Image: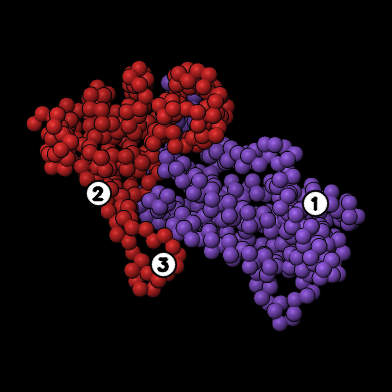
Amino acid sequence: MSTIPRAEQDPPAEAAAAIPEFCNAAGSGVSLLDEVRDLVAHEHLLRSLVMRDLTVRYKRSVLGVLWTMLNPLLMMLIFTLVFSVFFRFAIKHFEVYFLSEYLPWIFFSQTTANSMASMAWNGPLMKRVRIPKSIFALATTLSGIANLAISCIPLAIIMLIKGAPFSSAVVFLPVSFLILGVFTLGVSLTLSSLSVYFADIKETYQAAVFGLMYLAPIIYPMSIVPEKYLWLVRLNPLVHLLQIVRDPIYNGRLPTPHDLVISSICALAALISGWLVFRRLSAGFYAQL
Amino acid sequence: MSAVKAIEFDGVTVRFPTTRIPFVKEWFVRKLRGTAAVDTFAALSDVSLDIQPGECLGLIGFNGAGKSTLLRVAAGVITPSAGRAVVRGSVAPLIELGTGFDHELSGRENIFFNGALLGRSQRTMRARTDEIVEFSGLGQFIDLPLRTYSTGMVARLAFSIATAVDAAVVLLDEILAVGDASFRERCEERIRRFHKSGCTILLVSHDLASIEKLCDRVVFLEEGRIVALGDPPEVIRAYGERSGFHELRHNRSLSPGVPE
């Protein structure tokens, strides 16, 4: 049975014959260091969870990409018609204006919703083997980021067709995606932990998400917001997080330091509070799932 | 007796809520009224137990006695409400066979997915695939989706995977109850091999004959507490006596065949 060396399981300590010791104690919950270490040890699982998400979506290759883009493209057509034609917003390349925030928005709203579904879906797994429970929120965020990156291809094609200018500022996008990803991971951790306990979180959240979308200048230009309501729109952290994606794509410039700082602070705050909620609740998942 | 234990349970208590507050709204209302605390029952109460490296320990008891809960605490799936469990060495948990499977994937793909769950790489699992397929006896079924399998086939695959990965501590929950007679024999054979190679084994089973054959010591759990601990024949006898009593008490109509 044990003739093959155990190098795979405990790589660095192998030679020192260090036996992995696992302590399962009552108390304050898992420590951040332990969780990160556990996530690293389950790198293969993380990879296969992400791959499973992506292959389910892209199994039918071209059709898969089209399918992913169907919703944004359909929305683009409708909103272009309604706002650019009916309302006559004076926005140049409305399609690009819209998609440059709608795509990251879709990433945020779908990833957070998927993270809750993933908790329910993988409940039996968590009850069977010890896995770092934050792996599911992390996996949905990573596959969401991959989808976001893939959806930039059709966006680039639309920009070419519409003759919208490309700027070298797009090389900044990975940083914007990273900040947005951290924020999304934090919100996902909070929501998915709560959703294990409360069945109505999902519905409540869907309503909130709907509201948040209209409170961000995704469809409309910021200039139509009356002065006295500006604070309300700016209160929405997503306004800044989406702006740092739109700036390099649509405005052809780097995000302003102002938006970058606020986005980063929001992302960190979301991650920290997400971790705290997760840590507080994760020990009780077993009884709730 | 070795000074370093393979598994230590130290005053382990596990409480489960008996009620749920399923809605945020309700939780807030209860919080305001100060009735947010829910009732709990203890699945395990203050269980302390040391298991030596290389020991095969059997867990017996009636349904709901806490056997599986204790196994899950060792596996790290359940966090105790009080006390702690320390496990030394990599663990191969065999709990609730087959629930970690994706039924849309083929048996072969599930080998890799299950390996990943246990923290094993593709490479490791690839090296073991032939052995797993061979032991499971699934033949060409291995490339069909899992949803086409019978319950017994799923269980055989799960057992084959979990016992093919290297582990110092093996947790087995009712695996002898699944599969046909010949598979069961091979399971027992494999458990014996584990035992010989120095693995620590924690085995839950209602099959007392197997427990007596395989285990060095046996624990009899009742209502979350250790009632008896020691040599297999003795503890099994104690369990048998309680069992007659238990069935008379709870289950009179169902036990006409039990000699009293």
Residue labelled with disc 3: B26
Q: Are marks 2 and 1 on the same chain?
A: no
A196 with respect to A182 (left or right): left
Q: Residue at x 63, y 57 (%)?
A: A109
Give the residue at the far bottom of this rendering.
A228
Q: Residue B249: give its label.
A: none
B114 with respect to B201 (left or right): right
Please rate how many residues cluster around mark 3, counting C-alpha atoms within 10 Å: few if below 14, some from 14 to 19, many from 20: few
Rendering colour (chain B)? red
Q: CA distance from mark 2 to mark 1?
A: 60 Å
Q: Residue at x 69, y 58 (%)?
A: A105
Instruction: Report in which chain the residue with disc 3 lies.
Output: B
Q: Position of residue B239 (x, y in %)?
A: 16, 34
Task: Check the image and tell me how it is coloured.
Answer: by chain
Query: At numbered mark 1, what does the secondary structure look like: helix, strand or loop?
Result: helix
Q: Which label's residue is closer to the chain start, 3 or 2?
A: 3
Rendering colour (chain A)? purple
**Circle 1: residue type:** Leu
Q: CA distance from mark 1 to mark 3?
A: 45 Å
Please rate how many residues cluster around mark 1, counting C-alpha atoms within 10 Å: few if below 14, some from 14 to 19, many from 20: many
Q: Residue at x 45, y 18 (%)?
A: B137
